[in-house]
Image (cartoon, rainbow, N blue to C red):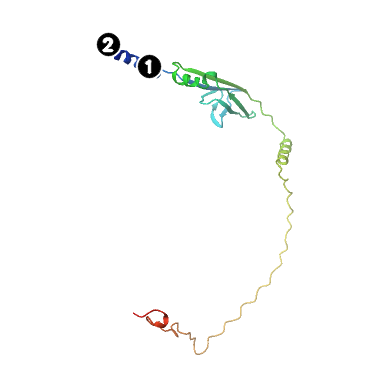
């Protein structure tokens, strides 16, 4: 084999190895699992429903997430859960871990939340809290209803009928002709300011 053939074969082998390494480059798999006590609560993450606890879902971005749990017989629980960025996802290392690292990196976050059982409130306490909220909001109290006073109906007099119409004159009705007193316009008359042709 000649030297150029060996160089071409070596370059081809290096390209194939590089392609395999880049093709098999891993990535970061991010997953959050939310568990609650008691289980079976409906879970919303950033106001999107994702399922009932225990539930797992993938996520792309780090940061603070709004997690809300809803279950009958329990008070709704809303928390702001931070998901800090790991060291291998900070610039410039994130390029290496996302594109060049040959294995997959798993970042799994588990959030355990406890829900408090709902207590039934007496109606008087609910009304008192509503009044406090209304006063805190600055709205005026609802005025009491005004008593309904019946109005006295006074009968109105009936108007007199219109006077009878007069009979037409004995000679009949004569109307002026609509064309009476009209003359046809003169064509191209100098007195009208239009020169003659």
Horizontal arrangement in the rendering, residue 10 relative to residue 59 (left or right): left
Q: What element carries label 1?
A: helix
Residue 111 against residue 164 in the figure, above or below: above
Check the image and name the residue furthest to the left.
1
Check the image and name the residue furthest to the top.
1
Horizontal arrangement in the rendering, residue 66 relative to residue 151 (left or right): left
Q: Residue at x 28, y 11 (%)?
A: 6
Circle 1/circle 2 CB separation < 8 Å: no
Q: Which residue is drawn at 54% across and 25% down?
A: 62
Residue 197, quarter of picture: bottom left
Q: Where is residue 82 in the image (x, y as percent from the top left)?
A: 59, 24
Q: Mark 2 points at which residue?
A: 3
How crowded pointer 1 is (Cα within 10 Å; few <14, some 14-19, many 20+) is rated as few
Residue 85, quarter of picture: top right
Q: Nearer the viewer, residue 43 or 194?
A: 194
Q: Which mark is residue 81?
A: none
Q: Where is residue 78 in the image (x, y as percent from the top left)?
A: 62, 29
Q: Position of residue 141 (x, y in %)?
A: 73, 45
Mark 1 vs mark 2, foreground winner is 2
* Quarter of the image where the N terminus is located: top left
Q: What element carries label 2?
A: helix
Q: How far apart are marks 1 and 2 (CA)?
A: 22 Å
Q: Position of residue 70 (x, y in %)?
A: 60, 29
Is residue 70 visible in the rendered structure shown here? no
Q: Which mark is residue 18?
A: 1
């Amino acid at each position: 084999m000649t030297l150029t053939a060996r160089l071409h074969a070596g370059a081809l082998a290096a390209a194939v190895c590089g392609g395999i390494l880049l093709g098999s480059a891993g990535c970061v798999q991010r997953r959050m699992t939310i568990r609650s006590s008691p289980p079976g609560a409906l879970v919303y993450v950033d106001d999107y429903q994702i399922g009932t606890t225990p539930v797992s879902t993938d996520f792309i971005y780090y940061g603070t997430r709004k997690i809300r749990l809803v279950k009958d017989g329990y008070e709704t629980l809303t928390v702001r859960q931070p998901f800090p960025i790991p060291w291998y996802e900070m610039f410039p290392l994130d390029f290496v871990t996302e594109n060049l690292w040959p294995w997959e990196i798993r970042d799994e976050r588990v959030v355990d939340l406890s829900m408090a059982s709902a207590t039934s409130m007496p109606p008087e306490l609910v009304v008192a809290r509503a009044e406090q909220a209304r006063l805190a909001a600055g709205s005026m109290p609802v005025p009491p209803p005004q008593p309904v006073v019946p109005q006295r109906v006074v009968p109105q007099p009936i108007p007199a009928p219109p006077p009878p119409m007069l009979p037409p004159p004995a000679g009949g009705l004569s109307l002026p002709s609509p064309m009476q007193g009209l003359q046809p316009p003169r064509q191209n008359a100098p007195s009208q300011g239009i020169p003659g042709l």
